[in-house]
Image: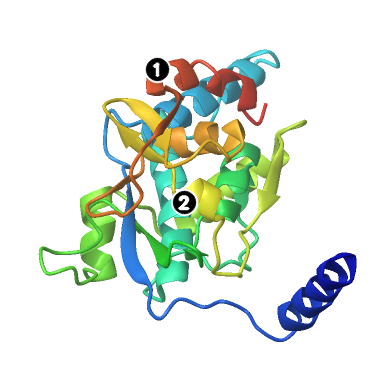
Amino acid sequence: MDKSINLLESYKKLVNSRLIPVPRSYDEIDVTFEVGEGTMLMEYADIEYQALCARIQLTGGEVPFSDEEFRSYIKTLLYSRVAWVRNVKYIIHPNDPIVVPAFLSVVLMNIGNAEDVSLGVRLIPRIEGMVDEKGVVKPLETIRDDLGLLEVFNMRKISNYLQSVDGYNYSKGYIKDKSGVFDFMSMQVVENYIVHHNADSHPVYALMASILQPHMVASVLSPLVKYGSVSFLHGLLWEVTAV
């Protein structure tokens, strides 16, 4: 019997090195992020802007752009990452040295095409309003007007100012890799709670997902676990500002 067990383990190692289970096909599911007025992304942008203003006012200065412009700045960064992943027209290229606030930078790193072999699911990011009723991505000019996105020139002006702020925590650009993190991409908002199909994901993914309010129109991922209400997670955003 002992010899049989040892042989089984040997066979497992041999086969594991040669065979990788692959689903016959993937169910492709769009994960939609909300960016309009009153969404958590705009709440995050407002909190970040207020913290920035408070820092600058301590030195007697004034932030040279409005809260509305900063909201558009944040939306443009998010849109560019999603557009890059989906192979459609973006505004900011990953290599453009545009300042990305620290927390948003980490969120963008997790956004992308994400697959789970065991479930046979591929999750693809999109932004509410970027596709038409037929599921076709709208022209960039239409998206820019509809979502209130900024031109590259205005993005650079705000970026240059943020870079000059002493102690501001940021990265530049975003990753070129188009793959995302499945634990993050599979978070959903259902009835104002961040939920997931299992309890294996770290709660930090729930916090990051809360600012995007992700949802899926059709999904095999039945939400089983609550990670927290959106309002509770909103209270944590003050602790992740870049200043």
Numbered marks: total: 2
Residue 7 percent coordinates (x, y): 84, 76
Which residue lies at the image location 23% right of the left edge and 55% below the top edge?
Answer: 218
Badge 1 amino acid: Ser
In the displayed structure, does residue 156 sit left or right of residue 152?
right
| Residue 174 lies in quadrant | bottom right
Residue 227 appears in the figure: yes
In the displayed structure, does residue 91 sit left or right of residue 97?
left
N-term mark: 2 or 1: 2
In the displayed structure, does residue 137 sit left or right of residue 75?
left
Q: Which mark is residue 231?
A: 1
Classed neighbour count for the residue bearing mark 1: other residues with Cα under 10 Å, few (<14), some (14–19), many (≥20): few
Residue 64 appears in the figure: no
Which residue lies at the image location 82% right of the left edge and 67% below the top edge?
Answer: 5
Q: Nearer the viewer, residue 106 or 58?
A: 106
Residue 211 percent coordinates (x, y): 44, 35
Looking at the rendered image, the quarter that the C terminus falls into is top right
* Mark 2 lies on residue: 185
Residue 80 percent coordinates (x, y): 45, 61
Q: Is residue 54 above or below residue 10?
A: above
Looking at the rendered image, the quarter that the N terminus falls into is bottom right
Badge 2 amino acid: Met
Secondary element at image label 1: helix
Q: Nearer the viewer, residue 17 or 120?
A: 17
Q: Is residue 67 above or below residue 85?
A: above
